C-alpha cells in the first residue's frame, strides 16, 4: 500500500469509528479527504475493498500492541502489566456502531479478522503463561490452553456486555479488580512476592 492509499485508509478508519460503516458513503469519504470519487476508486474499487483495507490497517496496529509478549528482556509479570494497559486502550477504543455494521453488512470480513485476532491473542497469552511457568513466577500446574481461552473469553465478554456501563468498564477500579482476580490465580509464591511489590502500578 503506497502512502496515498495509507493516508486515505487512516482517515476513513477515523470516519468509520466515529459514524459507523453504513453511515459513511464513498461520496462522504471523497468529500472528507478532498479528492474526487474517480481518484478514490483508483485506489479502492468499491466500499467493500476499502472496508477490508481499514480492517487490515487496524489489525496491523493491534499486532504492534501485542508484540510486548515477544520481549525477551522482561519477565512474564512485567509483560502482564504491559498487556493490562493494552487491554484498557482496546476497551476504550471499542466502537459498538462500527462492530455492529461490520458484522451485519460485511460478515465475511468480520469473521476473517476476528479469527486472526483470536489466534494472535491466544498465542500471546499462552506464550506468557509458558514464560511465567519457566521463570517460576506462575504455578507449575496451570493449564495454559484452558486459561488462555478463558482470558480471551473474558476480554470479548467485557466488550459485549450490558452488565456494566461504558464508564465503569474503562474505570481504574474495574480493570484493577479484573487484573488482580486473574493474576492472583496463576502466580506462584515467588510470583506473588513480585506482584505485591508492583500492584500500585495498576492504579496509574
Image (tube, rainbow, N blue to C red):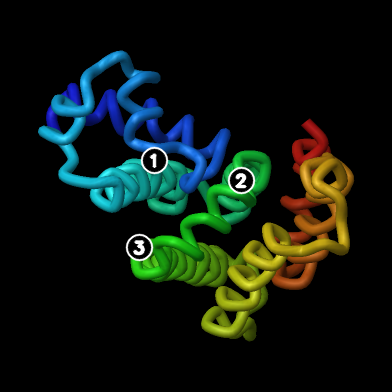
Specify the quadrant of the image occupied by residue 192. Answer: bottom right
Q: Earlier in the sequence, mark 3 or mark 1?
A: 1
Depth check, front residue: 185 or 3: 3
**Label for residue 119?**
none
Q: Earlier in the sequence, mark 2 or mark 1?
A: 1
Residue 130 appears at what percent x and percent y? 49, 71
Q: Which residue is mark 2?
A: 95
Q: Label 3 to label 1, Cα distance in Å? A: 17 Å
User: Residue at coordinates 34% horizontally, 48% vertically from top-left?
Assistant: 51
Residue 114 appears at what percent x and percent y? 44, 65
The answer, for residue 198, to whether it is visible in the render is yes
Where's the C terminus, which quadrant?
top right
**Label for residue 61?**
1
Residue 151 appears at what percent x and percent y? 63, 69
Specify the quadrant of the image occupied by residue 30. Answer: top left
Q: Which residue is mark 3?
A: 109
Query: Does 137 appear above or below 51?
Result: below
Amino acid at each position: 500500500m503506497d502512502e496515498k492509499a495509507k493516508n486515505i485508509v487512516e482517515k476513513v478508519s477515523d470516519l468509520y469509528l466515529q459514524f459507523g460503516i453504513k453511515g459513511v458513503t464513498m461520496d462522504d469519504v471523497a468529500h472528507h479527504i478532498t479528492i474526487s470519487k474517480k481518484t478514490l476508486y483508483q485506489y479502492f474499487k468499491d466500499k467493500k475493498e476499502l472496508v477490508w483495507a481499514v480492517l487490515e490497517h487496524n489489525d496491523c496496529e493491534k499486532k504492534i500492541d501485542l508484540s510486548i509478549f515477544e520481549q525477551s528482556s522482561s519477565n512474564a509479570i512485567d509483560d502482564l502489566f504491559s498487556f493490562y494497559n493494552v487491554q484498557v486502550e482496546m476497551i476504550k477504543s471499542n466502537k459498538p456502531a462500527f462492530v455492529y455494521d461490520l458484522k451485519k453488512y460485511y460478515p465475511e470480513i468480520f469473521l476473517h479478522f476476528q479469527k486472526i485476532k483470536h489466534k494472535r491473542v491466544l498465542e500471546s497469552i499462552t506464550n506468557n503463561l509458558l514464560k511465567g511457568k519457566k521463570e517460576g513466577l506462575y504455578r507449575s500446574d496451570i493449564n495454559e490452553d484452558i486459561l488462555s481461552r478463558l482470558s480471551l473469553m473474558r476480554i470479548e465478554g467485557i466488550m459485549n456486555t450490558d452488565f456494566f456501563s461504558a464508564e465503569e468498564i474503562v474505570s481504574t477500579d474495574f480493570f484493577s479488580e479484573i487484573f488482580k482476580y486473574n493474576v492472583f490465580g496463576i502466580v506462584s509464591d515467588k510470583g506473588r512476592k513480585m506482584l505485591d511489590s508492583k500492584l500500585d502500578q495498576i492504579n496509574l
